[in-house]
Amino acid sequence: MKLKRVIIKNFRSYREEIQISVDNFTAFIGRNDVGKSTILEALEIFFNNNIVKIEQSDACVYNTDKKVVIGCVFSDLPDQVILDSQSSTNFAQEYLLNSNGELEIHKLYDCNLKTPKEIVFALSYHPKADDTRDLIKLKIADLKNRARTLGVDLSSIDQRSNPALRDAIRNRIGDLQLEEQMVPLNEENAKAVWESIVKLLPQFALFQADRPSNDEDSEVQDPMKYAISEAIKTVEEDLLRIKESVHNQVLAVAARTLDKLRQMDPALESELAPRFKSEPKWKDLFKLSLTSDDQIPINKRGSGVRRLILLNFFRAEVERKQIETGSPGVIYAIEEPETAQHPNI
């Protein structure tokens, strides 16, 4: 899939709905505080809600309505997809595309809540006829019941296939009364459909080049520290087993020592107990740094060099995660790319 447009409404400085077209290379240029960063951070919220999270204060202060909308429109859709069963289908067959044949996903956040939660919709040219508009929400047992109630002949239908059952019901109804409408993807079986769509979306990666750089920010000072932390996470179970093995062996030695002590001084033995003073700090056991031929560490280099190293660490990590997750593509978003950057290219 390819991101084609971004939709923002009632988010920070954008009170009215705006739609921004996106191409293979898109740059936002303008004076300070006009909403350039807002667009990138809206995308981060839509795709990840991680580096930037939706907050109660994100609703536009110039509007009494506190409901924020962030949407994305996708083109270059796959011909076949697996949604809520193992059967192949496509977005057009499931009536999940807008009137232009695009996949348009809107996320609604109610900023009246202290922690706004997302509600997901597909703006779709979708059936509104009775017994058809809610089919995407129905699980397989409910689809079978709906089909039998409508007198659908299921003898030649694969009753293990949600798409086949939905298609049979629609064919039975005939006039679907198609109309562009918001189709909820947070309800019942529609959740499984949305989870499958998420796997098909491109991975979005936001790099904030102008983020603060100080001694406490180890990822900025030396991304290899972050790399060690990430590597340790992958072997946490092994490290836990090592810790337990060491603990058990040491406690056994302590128990034998106290047993012998009891023979000489029972009063002293009763006062003592084996206790570990702290948990092992695995990340402190490994030291790795990118240094120059002059052995100058990263945090002693110029600001521009540190940013370039971090930027390329960021690129490498995104590509690694893309491979691990099987994401079909990546959207790189770089905020303030000119900050302290003077690459010789």
Image: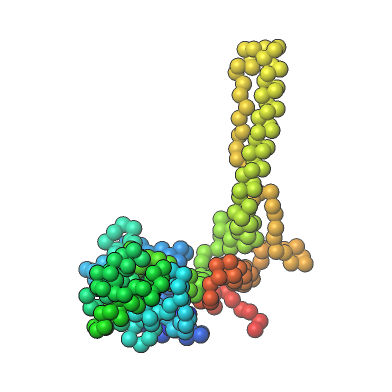
Q: In the image, is residue 298 above or below residue 330?
A: above
* Residue at the image point whose x is 61% and y is 24% from the top: 273
Q: Work out whether residue 19 or residue 85 is closer to the camera in this orientation and state it.
A: 85
Q: What number of labels is visible?
A: 0
Query: Horizontal and vertical percent for residue 51?
Result: 47, 64
Q: In the image, is residue 169 above or below residue 144?
A: below
Quadrant where the C terminus is found in the figure: bottom right
* Residue at the image point whose x is 68% and y is 26% from the top: 254
Left or right? Give the position of 27 relative to 258.
Answer: left
Q: Work out whether residue 249 or residue 171 is closer to the camera in this orientation and state it.
A: 171
Question: Residue 67 occupies which quadrant of the picture?
Answer: bottom left
* Residue at the image point whose x is 31% and y is 65% from the top: 142
Q: Is residue 44 visible?
A: no
Query: Horizontal and vertical percent for residue 163?
Result: 39, 74
Q: How is the image coloured?
A: rainbow
* Residue at the image point whose x is 65% and y is 35% from the top: 247
Left or right? Give the position of 58 relative to 344.
Answer: left
Left or right? Give the position of 197 relative to 334.
Answer: left
* Most distant residue in the bottom direction: 100
Query: Horizontal and vertical percent for residue 134?
Result: 28, 71
Q: Work out whether residue 36 or residue 276 is closer to the camera in this orientation and state it.
A: 276
* Most distant residue in the right direction: 293
Query: Horizontal and vertical percent for residue 160?
Result: 41, 68
Q: Work out whether residue 247 or residue 29 is closer to the camera in this orientation and state it.
A: 247
Q: Is residue 235 visible?
A: yes
